[in-house]
Amino acid sequence: MLTLQGKHIYLRALEPEDLAFIHDIENDETIWEISNTITPYSKYLIKQYLDQAHKDIFEVKQLRLVICNTNDEAIGLIDVFDFDFKNRRAGIGILIKDSENKQKGFGKEAVQLLTNYCFTHLDLHQLYCNISEENEASLTLFKNQGFKEVGLKKDWNFVNGHYKNEYLFQLINTDVY
């Protein structure tokens, strides 16, 4: 089982016991905008997803990890997606579930752990993320972690009857290549 240990949180692989936690997140309409979701997910579908979560990132092109606090409670998710080994890049996304766990540095630590993992173990050259221009918390988080704004996608996402712009950020690993 993959575990990436930080000072206040750790990242671990998905487990069957995460079914209710992931079901709550995937069916929370207030965050569907972040994941580009427009329909709810059944527990059956999420269970099937968890049954396949052991597959290698090189096969499925993604990796989802659970963010846990020091009490071993799941507090969020962090993802690697669009894994492109040929070009040595991937997208990342993060979600801290409940407001009482936000603004405590957990997201910062999770992004640091995942970035280090991607650059060290996956040998990636760059990471990128897509952030709504209204998502101030994520804009601040990724800017503070060294991600650079490289573009603004105008009218990119249609949300609640209107279009929203989305920023593209990149972090290039200058230590290699």
Image (cartoon, rainbow, N blue to C red):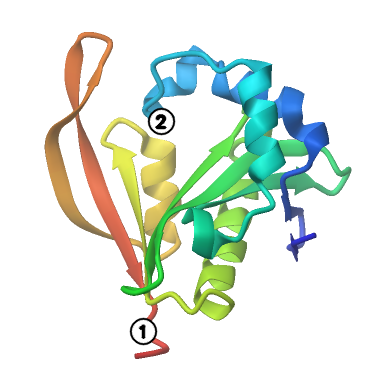
Please report the residue visible at 43 percent of the width from the left and 22 percent of the height from the top: 32
Residue for badge 1: 174
Quadrant of the image for the N terminus? bottom right
Residue for badge 2: 34
| 122 is higher (above) or lower (below) than 40 | below
Mark 1: amino acid: Thr
Left or right of 10 on screen, residue 62:
left
x, y percent for residue 90: 40, 61
x, y percent for residue 87: 31, 73
Question: Which quadrant would residue 145 be assigned to in this image?
Answer: bottom left
Mark 2: amino acid: Ile
Please report the residue visible at 34 percent of the width from the left and 90 percent of the height from the top: 177
Please report the residue visible at 34 percent of the width from the left and 74 percent of the height from the top: 86
x, y percent for residue 121: 59, 77
Viewer-closest of 62 and 68: 62
| 45 is higher (above) or lower (below) than 146 | above
x, y percent for residue 74: 76, 37
Viewer-closest of 72 and 36: 36
| 115 is higher (above) or lower (below) than 32 | below
Residue 63's disc number: none
| 103 is higher (above) or lower (below) than 57 | above
- At mark 2, the secondary structure is helix
